[in-house]
Image (tube, rainbow, N blue to C red):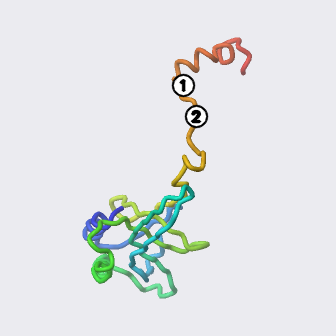
Amino acid sequence: MNYTTFKTHLRALTELHFVQPSGDFVPRHFHITEAGLVTKHFVDCGGTVRTEKTIVLQLWVHTDYEHRLPPQKLEQILEMAAPLFGDADLEIQVEFQTETVGRYAIGFNGRQFTLIPTATDCLAKEACGLTDNKEKRSLADLSASSSSCCTPGGGCC
């Protein structure tokens, strides 16, 4: 989710909740300890120099169980950090610690924000020889070639 969309959803909320991929809620007494711009400048395995920029919110849970972060306060935090983000409408990710610190994409289900697992990927599949060489066949062709197996009396079951 990009910054503009996140702020639009945030402004419509009266309570702020985040749901983990497991379906469990991030405890209601979480803090946003950081709102920052993360720039990753790297070379992929194919030799291409790349730069990625994301806005990262760090959610942290402590033992102050009475703490509640209202949406308006998060909006104030984002406004203080806005000069860091520049004019780009960057993607927002969330760092949250369970067994280890994980970084999640953000979704919205109409009532609360959802943490969406992220995954690694090879950005230079062709250079690594990882092209998808699967043969594409139509279902009609498959049924014709397997008629001796999966037909009554064909011996497959």
Amino acid type shown at disc 1: Arg
Compared to residue 125, the image places residue 140 above or below, namely above
Residue at image position (29%, 67%) is 88
Q: Residue at x 46, y 70 (%)?
A: 40
- What's the residue at 26%, 66% (across, down)? 8
State yes or no: discs 1 and 2 in contact (Cβ < 8 Å).
no
Residue 52, located in which quarter of the rendered image? bottom left
- The residue that disc 2 covers is 134
Q: Residues within 10 Å of mark 2 (few under 14, many from 20)?
A: few
Which type of secondary structure does the marked residue at label 1 adopt?
loop
User: Residue lying furthest top in this view?
Assistant: 153
Residue 131 at x, y percent in the picture: 56, 42
Residue 95 location, x and y as percent?
48, 73
Alpha carbon separation for disc pair 1 and 2 = 9 Å
The amino acid type of the residue labelled 2 equals: Lys
Q: Secondary structure at mark 2?
A: loop
Judged left or right of residue 39, residue 8 is left
**Is 133 placed left or right of 56 in the picture?**
right
Instruction: Identify residue for label 1.
Output: 137
Asked if residue 136 is positioned above or below residue 73 in the image, the reply reads above
Rendered-image quadrant of the C terminus: top right
Question: From what the image shows, is residue 105 above or below residue 123?
Answer: below
Please state the horizontal and vertical placement of residue 56, each as a whole percent of the image.
42, 73
Q: Which of these two is toward me, 38 or 114?
A: 38
Say the numbered circle drawn on residue 3. none
Q: x and y percent of residue 45 in the render?
A: 57, 58
